[in-house]
Every structure is written in C-alpha cells, then in structure tokens.
Image (spheres, rainbow, N blue to C red):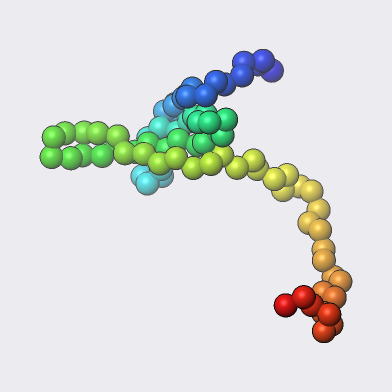
Amino acid sequence: MSTYQKKDGDISVFTNHSDNANAPAFKGNVVLQGIEYQVSLWRRQGAKGEFLAGKLQVKVEVVDRQAPAQSYTSKPEPHGDDLPF
C-alpha cells in the first residue's frame, strides 16, 4: 500500500475505459481545502473545436454491501404536552 498523502490542490485524472457512450472520458480525484472530490471530464465539441467539460462531486466512501442491513422495528416515542414550543 502506498504511503503517499495527497496535498491540497493535487489532482489525478485517468482515461476512463467504458462502453457507455455517456460515461466521462476521464475520471480522477482532487483535494481542495482538505476535502477529496471525484473529477469527471467529458470531451465536447464547440464552435472553436474540442474541449473538456467537467464535474466535481464530494467523494463518498462506498458502504460494505455485504454487511447485514440494520432493522429498525421500534416505534417512535409519542410526545406529550411537555414540549417547550
């Protein structure tokens, strides 16, 4: 495992190999103010030629889908007349 720590402003973008025509041509990540974002870039054609259009999204960790889901079977507590509002 790598010990490299990304620094603020570091960006890494790689070619995205996908059969989906709507998928981004490039994907990667960037760190801004200590928050990691996913980068997606699409090739577009404009009046002055080809350019890249992109999107940034906060990187969300994938939850382990093999873990059993928690079940909430208890009913909410009824509120009495002692509410402060």
Q: Residue at x 57, y 30 (%)?
A: 34
Q: In the displayed image of the protein, which residue is found farthest to the top?
A: 3
- In this view, which residue lies farthest toward the left? 47
Residue 1 position, x and y percent, is: 69, 18
The residue furthest bottom is 81
Residue at screen point 82% across, 74% down: 76
Q: Quadrant of the C terminus?
A: bottom right
Q: Is residue 39 visible?
A: yes
Q: Is residue 72 above or below residue 47?
A: below
Where is residue 46 drawn, in percent x and y?
18, 40
For residue 4, side relative to residue 79 (left or right): left
Depth check: 57 or 20 in front?
A: 57
**Residue 66: where, in percent of width, then height?**
76, 47
Which residue is drawn at the image coordinates 56% and 39% (left, top)? 59
Nearer to me, 82 or 75: 82
Q: Is residue 18 visible in this depiction of the protein?
A: no
- Residue 24 falls left or right of residue 59: left
Q: Which residue occupies 40% across, 41% down?
A: 55
**Picture layout, residue 41 above or below residue 64:** above
Q: Quadrant of residue 7?
A: top right
Tally of marks = 0
Q: Where does residue 39 sit, x and y in percent of width and height?
A: 45, 35
